[in-house]
Image (cartoon, rainbow, N blue to C red):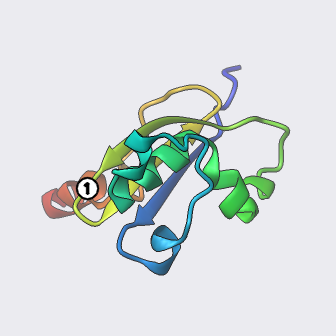
Amino acid sequence: MKARNIQQEILLFTGTEFTASQYSENDNSEASKNLTEREKLQEACWNGLLPEKLPELFNATKSEARLFLWQMREANHFLALEMGEYPEIPEVNYSLDPYFFLPQQIEN
């Protein structure tokens, strides 16, 4: 029997109060001070911001599985984060990302 991979997809919309909030930066160098809000959000996500800012998403998993951020895709108004125990291509029909499921809806 094939083991199930727990996957979680998160869309973070940019230009919101959440994304404009101050992030706990691990790097206080001069280069990090010149980053845009979007770039700071991306860096914060890679540095582990999500469990700290959105604990309800990570406490909801029933198993003891550890979720890792495998991919971050940038769109015009959001960041699409793909998390899981190991990398796996998300199923198009079940994705939250409108760039994945909208073309499928048009074909139907």
Residue corresponding to mark 1: 75
Relative horizontal placement of residue 78, taking residue 40 as reference (left or right) = left
Answer above or below: position of 55 versus 82: below
Q: Is residue 83 left or right of residue 3?
A: left
Q: Residue furthest front?
A: 30
Under circle 1, the secondary element is: loop
Q: Which residue sits at x=85%, y=38%? A: 64
Query: Which residue is pictured at 80% across the width and 56% down the height?
Result: 59
Could you tell me residue 90's position as x and y percent?
Answer: 43, 40
Spot occupied by residue 92 in the image (x, y as percentages of width and height): 35, 46
Residue lying farthest left? 107
Assign the C terminus to one quadrant of the image: bottom left
Relative placement, left or right, of 76 versus 13 is: left
Q: Residue at x 65, y 30 (%)?
A: 85
Residue 37, above or below 6 = below
- Report whether residue 55 is seen: yes
Residue 53, picture quadrant: bottom right
Image vertical order of residue 98 relative to residue 81, above or below: below
Does the image show residue 57? Answer: no
User: Mark 1 Cα within 10 Å, few/some/many (few <14, many 20+)?
Assistant: few
Q: Tell which of 11 and 94 is nearer to you.
A: 11
Residue farthest bottom in this picture: 17
Amino acid carrying label 1: it is Ala
Front residue of 54 and 95: 54
Q: At which x and y percent is residue 88?
A: 48, 29
